[in-house]
Amino acid sequence: MIGEDRTTSSDDGEEGGLLNATFGALGRVLMGFFAEFGRIVLLLRSVIRYIPTAIRSRRLVLEQMYMIGVGSLPLVLLIGSFTGAIAALQATNLFAKFNLLALARPFVGGSIATVVFTELSPVLTALVIAGRVGGSIAAQIGTMKVSEQIDALEMMAVHPSRYLAMPRVMAALVMMPMLIVFSDLVALLGAFLLVILKFTFQPADYWDSIRRFFSVYEIVVGMLKSATFGGVTALIGCYVGFNTEGGAEGVGNSTVRSFTLSSAAILVLDALFGYVL
Amino acid sequence: MIVIDNVHKAFGPKQVLRGVSMLIPEGETTVIIGRSGTGKSVLLKLIVGLLEPDEGTITIDGRRVDLMSESERYQMRRRFGYVFQGAALFDSMTVADNLVLGLYEHGERNTEVLREEVVRNLVNVGLLPDPRTVSASVFNQAYEILANKKPAELSGGMRKRVGVARALVGSPEYIFYDEPTTGLDPITSEQIDDLVAALTHKLDVTSVVITHDIFSVYKVAHTVIMLDEGLIRFRGTPLELRSSHDPVVHEFLERYAHSHAEVP
Ligand SMILES: Nc1ncnc2c1ncn2[C@@H]1O[C@H](COP(=O)(O)OP(=O)(O)OP(=O)(O)O)[C@@H](O)[C@H]1O
Ligand SMILES: [Mg+2]
């Protein structure tokens, strides 16, 4: 009785409190999100302001292009070839399940190509790059932040956005579409090997199908997407790096934070692209 | 001249500076002493705009730092050299590149000029022998070895001295030293002190030195400022410091006298 009494009397207050607390927390999360988003946009603005200096600082940009492009190529090739093979396996298995394989034969290559060019290759490559490149950008800049190297740059009157952020964002924008072309190629090869070996396709069937359904538009969409994903990943890596605090632990946290933020951004942007294009 | 007026700075709930006002006169060396964590490094960073005060103003040659545009602030910083407490060398770059990054990025691409600047300042801090005292081949060999090293391959004391050398590049009008001799052997410390004093005398540089080394205070200071609990506790000449009756100042100096007396 007494216990019941207490529950009912405190229920009202607690519900109000809980509601307030929920909205309060939600409000704080939203505020935090918009504040952070705003700061990323500010960083983007200062990176864009320094793009004209890219020619004069080409050494920095080229260094980053090498890091991002050549450095990531082996991983991208590995992911690309398996992506293609798995896409082919899923597609052909599906047709086989409904006994439509013979009928679907002319369409298999083309549908694999579409899925790979517009969706799988850009998104999976971007996620891999978010881990490899985004993480390393955040760690490198974060280390510079906590060891006062960013302050030292500032004291030499060298703007960190120009010296560190712009070359990384530029390099990612340029190199990602190139990586995608490689990824697309090996994905088609991977798919080719699978359908030949497992489903005994004639090579001509496969390539004819791709040629028939192939459209440059799809490749361009894929390259556009991946440039955006790459630029955003590099930008977020820089942003997280510049805001690192608290020694080696802080740098570790930044690496994880950069990967989390950029993979979320990639998936959201991919949905937006799907909606718009 | 730098004028600091009623500057407050807190980090979250932690009040570090609680109303610091001081004047840094032109062409002199001002030494800042005080216990660990009283905000000496924070004060230097506030002056050059690496941190922003919560309250109060900083004026450099009549221009308020907080009202400067970004490009004005960078223009101002080119007249400054700054030795960071932890050296803050760029660890992806060689010693030579560390020194001339600023010059290079501001358009100096003449390798001869850049190399000369590197040599001059590495000699200044005693990391290279005076080229007049050794043969050219010995000197060049020493130069090649040092200039191409990465910071991670240097000892702590060498890193510190490269940090000092980097601050001297470009002949700045103001040089801020955050503990330039901490962790150095007595002989090198003295060499750095001599360098600080010489720069002020010969080149009319305005220096601000944070130090825990009482010998440096007597050697280089025109004015000594002691920070305590976020406020200026003492301001005066080294002589006045020695004869101060303030118990806090007194205790601070006593500790040093003892710690050095214990050394055999
Ligand atoms: N970026 C920062 N974020 C949070 N707190 C800071 C930051 N910089 C300094 N502090 C705090 O401000 C206080 C003063 O730091 P400061 O580095 O100025 O001390 P200091 O007088 O230079 O000491 P030391 O002689 O040990 O170098 C310290 O308690 C430090 O924790
Ligand atoms: Mg300090």
Image (cartoon, helix red, strand yellow):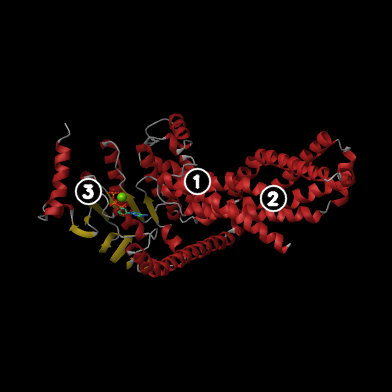
Asked whether the viewer can see residue A56, the reply is: no
Q: How many other residues sit within 10 Å of disc 2, few (<14), some (14-19) or many (≥20)?
A: many
- Amino acid beneath label 3: Val
Against A268, residue A13 (above or below) is below
Does residue B38 appear to the left or right of A210 in the view shown?
A: left
**Disc 1 sits on a residue from what chain?**
A
- Mark 1 falls on what kind of element? helix
Q: Determine the CA span between mark 3 and mark 1.
A: 39 Å
- Say which of A209 and A102 sits in front: A102
**What residue would you read off at disc 2?**
A122
Q: Position of residue B102 (x, y in %)?
A: 48, 51
Q: Position of residue A168 (x, y in %)?
A: 58, 51
- Amino acid beneath label 1: Ala
**What residue would you read off at disc 1?**
A139
> In which quadrant of the rendered image does the N terminus of chain A lie?
bottom left
- Amino acid beneath label 2: Pro
Q: How many other residues sit within 10 Å of disc 3, few (<14), some (14-19) or many (≥20)?
A: many
Does residue A114 appear to the left or right of A39 in the view shown?
A: right
Q: Determine the CA span between mark 3 and mark 2.
A: 62 Å
Q: Where is residue B250 in the image (x, y as percent from the top left)?
A: 12, 51
**What residue would you read off at disc 3?**
B217
Residue A128: mark: none
Is the CB–ligand 1 distance for label 3 below 8 Å? no
Asked whether the viewer can see residue A156, the reply is: yes
Q: Determine the CA span between mark 1 and mark 2.
A: 24 Å
- Mark 2 falls on what kind of element? helix
Q: How many other residues sit within 10 Å of disc 1, few (<14), some (14-19) or many (≥20)?
A: many
Q: Position of residue B97 (x, y in %)?
A: 49, 43
**Disc 2 sits on a residue from what chain?**
A
Front disc: 1 or 2: 2
- Mark 3 falls on what kind of element? helix
